[in-house]
Image: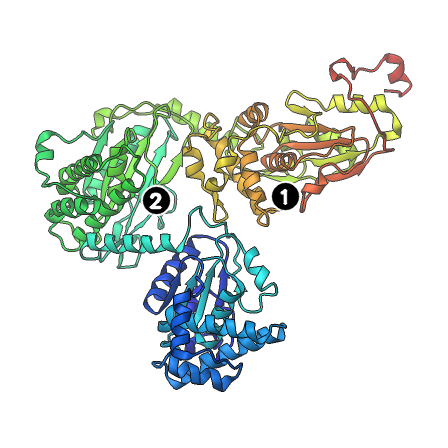
Amino acid sequence: MLPRVHPTQLNDYFTELSRRPQKGVYFCRIGGYNEQIHAFLLQYYQTARARGVVIAGRLPNPDNQNIAYYNEIMGSAFQADLNFIQTRLAKWLPRMTPGQRDNVARSIYDTLMELRRAGKNDNILQNAYVKFMCWLYYRFERIVGLLGQESLPKIIYDGDLGLYELLILRTLSTAGCDIVLLQLKGDAAYQKVDPQSRWSSAWQQPGLQPFPQGYSLTGLGKEIQEAASRERLYGSAPKLMNCTNAWISGKILEDIRRDSRARGEDKSLFYNCFCRMSGVEDKVTYANDLYQLQADLKAAGRKVVICSGSIPPPDNGEVGQIQRGTYRDLNQMLMGLSANLRSFANEILRPIVTKAFVDLMLEAAKGAGPADSLGRQTTRAVNLLCWIKRYQGKLFSGWRGGDVAAFLYLGGCRNDNEALFLRFLARLPVDVMIFCPDLSKTCVLQDPLLYEVHYTASLALAAYPEERSQMRGTTAAYQAERELDTILYQDSGIYRNQQYARAEALTLETTYEEIAIYWDQELSYRPNFATDPQKVTMPVLFAKASGVAKSKVQDYWVGIKKLLTENTILVTQVPWVDTTEYNPMKPFATEFFRNGKLQRDKIKAHKAYPYGFLREAVQDHLLDKLQLLIDSSRIKGTFTNGTEYTIVSTVLNLDKNVLRLLQSFDFTKKNPKILFLNTGEAMYALEDAIRAAFLSLAGFDVLFFVPTGYQCIEQHFAKYPPAEHICGAFLYDLQVPDFSRISTQTSFLDRLFGRG
């Protein structure tokens, strides 16, 4: 019999017994999901099918027919005795070896004794024994025949687990079997039968999410079958795989010029680039940059294809060259149409092209709507094959291992067919560059492999400049202006409007009196302000003022009125966020945040994304700080009870006034501000704390005036709450005045006698 030990990593399950870190069996409960867990379960499912048992749904009790057969063969005798159990197993499961029989008998005996110690009588022990014997015969016979080998047999179980189901699994575990329990509904049901986790251990790992809706062992089996079908469609496996963008430095126009054989050392990979550049960095030099790029690529002997505005659709002649037939289903269609790719005579290139074609067509079919019939899918595949054949010679003639062609497309994809073709090329030895200088036009392409570069300036360019006649020069005055711009705004303490696109906040620890001094001051004049070539460090205020100085209420209101600058939002409503109102971002929060990371591309491309009208730099700044707020676990419940999803939905649902301040915020000038005034006993909502913490990270000054001194926001912070200043006596039931009627001016006599 083997002890139960906890694996250091899930892949330990596939390690032979003698090579495990600790010699023993694994019996784990998996109650959370990520891509790594999914990959493990796929492999474990296949292993259990080959050397074990897959139990999808609850393990059913032996039926009357099962029990009748058992009684016919074995009789009704029962003794809670090890020798009795060994003798009975020899008759009931005769193919077991003596060693296997001894282990199983001891495990059954130990389990029965466990029940006896729990106060169960002999009738209950006999019922459990008969259940175990029937389950061993009808469900686990192949398991017991594999016990005692270096490769331990496997069980995977995803149904509801009662006491006796757990006992038979515990019996098989101690007899020498690895087990995985898939806890799709959480761990609560298991804890009812084994509250101290004596017989299995929960697998813990940071960033796990709930299993997707409908996830099951049945679904895993279908996915494995689909993968097997896909392998048959590929034919021979590719000898080279794409390494797309992982090697780039981020200076794309330099990266794409790099010799393809100097991009990486792994001979099983080809290194290509897949990038979209939106907007332009410099309107005057942009056309020249594009011209020089294609000229340099051609001079280096690279195959280059250039398209402008659109990829011309296939004509009738091109469609007529595609061999096709009548197909019953998608797999038959792909098998038939992929025969058109045999024109790629190169034995290394052809499997790469076939795999990319099959993968993308299967992906497109999976996301197809009800109206997307097999006929439409066939038309889409034929269209893709036409383009492949059209550009095949220009990109791959004379291709040798290591060659990487270039496809330069100006204008962006206008439709899904163009997007599909460029996604296809990006999985071949081709650098695919999409230039979208005109920001008023939309490129519909979306792909997880795509690398994005964004500039704020926009330029209408009709065609890719392949000739000198399409170039624009610059004047001496222009160059002088550029040089003067560099001298004035680099390391001089003078800053151009919106010079920096990135910034990080640093909370200033101040006295209460200093808040009024720094409040309306430009950030560049505050202590600890700093810049580097990439970003600004913004000193911000994040504080709470409790009480009223000297109990002078009128002076208190005047002091607050002085802080109400033109870029200050005053919040007197408690809570600020009305949690009863519908938040349109809430349904998508789990989709936008996965594996601990914001899905930025998915967020920006989503139809419900509300910030697309903001400057691109502002959107990136907003998403940077949203990720930072989650990573910091500053708000209580982050990564413990799903608060991270509330953070996502709250930050993606800011009101118009806040967004306008963010849009016009210059990181080196005066920063926007939020001033909260709470004179009663009401508490701020969790969403208020999320907004306050987020806006502080985004560069806002955030100040709470609480004359009562009550805790009203602190309860939502796990760490870094606003710094509290006790300013005077606590006063209650103050009525918030109309600040438009409060004057901050003092009379001559007040100033003379120091009463202002």
- Which quadrant of the figure has residue 714? top right
Q: Is residue 26 visible?
A: no
* Label 2, label 1: how far apart the Cα atoms are: 32 Å
Q: Secondary structure at mark 1?
A: loop
**Image point 30% across, 25% down: which residue?**
473
Residue 750 x/y as whole percent:
88, 16
- In the shown orientation, is residue 265 left or right of residue 113? left
Q: Is residue 190 left or right of residue 701?
A: left
Q: Residue furthest right?
A: 753
Give the image's coloring scheme.
rainbow
Q: Is residue 434 above or below residue 249?
A: above
Label 2 residue SS? loop
Q: Is residue 586 above or below residue 335?
A: above
Q: Earlier in the sequence, mark 2 or mark 1?
A: 2
Give the residue type at disc 1: Ile
- Quadrant housing residue 190: bottom right
Residue where numbered disc 2 is placed:
449
> Few, some or many C-alpha atoms within 10 Å of disc 2 (few <14, some 14-19, many ≥20)?
some
Q: Which residue is mark 1?
A: 635
Q: Position of residue 113 (x, y in %)?
A: 57, 77
Picture residue at 38% right of the left edge, 47% below the top: 249
Q: Is residue 318 left or right of residue 164?
A: left
Say few, some or many: other residues with alpha carbon within 10 Å of mark 1 (under 14 / 14 to 19 / 20 or more): many
Question: What is the three-letter code of the residue carrying label 2?
Answer: Leu
Q: Position of residue 646 (x, y in %)?
A: 57, 39
Give the answer, above or below, for where 267 lies relative to 259.
Answer: below
